[in-house]
Image (cartoon, helix red, strand yellow):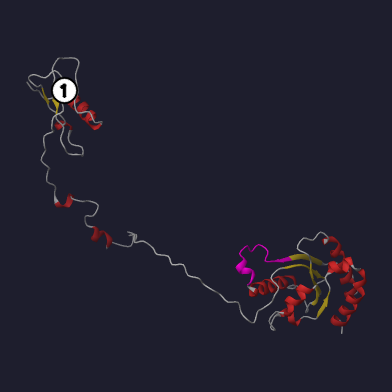
Amino acid sequence: MSRELPPQQAFQTHCLAQMGVVSWLSSSDSVTGTVFMPIQPWPIAVEAAAGFVPPPSSAGFKAVEPVSVPVEKRATDEKDPLVHHLREQLNAGPEIIVEDLQPIEELAVDIVVEPDPALNTHITRLNIYAYALSNKLLILSDVPEVFSQAEEIERLALKMGQALLKQPINEWQGSAFSWPGALKNPHFWKRTDWLFGALESYVGRLVKDFPDTPLLVLAGAQITQLVEDLAPESPLKHYPTARIVSLSELYRIPELRKEAWDVMQSSLFR
């Protein structure tokens, strides 16, 4: 005998089939049977989920080959909705963005930038303290990379400026300049044009409020050599300049101060 499953049992059979169960047993009666499921992998209507046919001489359950279900024909407009009318959609307007999925080839190219031969110096590291005094005098002094006597040479610079300008120093500012500073790539340490540009910009900020041409004191061999290596058109080349030993040396060796004083008097006030 065979009978059609009620909707509730048919739905249960369908759910079991989704979990891989193709046979079922109802303990409320003694009938046995086989559940037929279609071969289509996509969901189908629940009404055609299963049929129940009890075998004439079977004491258990067995899997049987599912019957083939004819594939229904679909209209042309319903096929492949993802690519249907794709050309019309692409030509519809700029609001549709199509990504180019072709692989991108990146070529490694060595770019060698030669420094300007006119900007050349053997100075690759520089540490200086700067003191701008009374908007008239600028002192640039070499200091060691690790320096712990900043307050002492600051007082020395103020005394020196007061003696040179013959007036109290009521307005002044001090700061530090270091090269290469935060630059970590050794390639950029050799770019002397960058060093020259950084130094000129630093000095330009210090003297921007000077009403007249600054009086410049270069204290130390490195800052003196670096300014000499600047291009002839550099503004630092045209300041009245005195070249002496560094302030840290003047502080440690007071005997050098007389010679430094004579140099500054003859160079700045001639």
Residue 101 placed where, x, y %?
A: 34, 59
Give the residue at x 63% y 73%: 191
Quadrant for the C terminus, please: bottom right
Quadrant for the N terminus, please: top left
Residue 70 placed where, x, y %?
A: 10, 40
- For mark 1, what is the residue? 61
Q: Is residue 77 magenta?
A: no
Task: Answer left or right for 223 relative to 251.
Answer: left
The quarter of the picture where residue 43 lies is: top left
The quarter of the picture where residue 159 lies is: bottom right
Local secondary structure at mark 1: loop
Segment colored magenta: 177-190
Q: Height in image: 238 above or below 124?
A: below
Give the residue at x 82% y 61%: 150
Give the residue at x 78% y 64%: 144
Task: Answer left or right for 46 relative to 104.
Answer: left
Total numbered labels = 1
Q: Is residue 182 magenta?
A: yes
Is residue 142 visible in this depiction of the protein?
A: yes
The residue nearer to you, when weighing 171 against 147, is 147
Residue 15 placed where, x, y %?
A: 23, 29
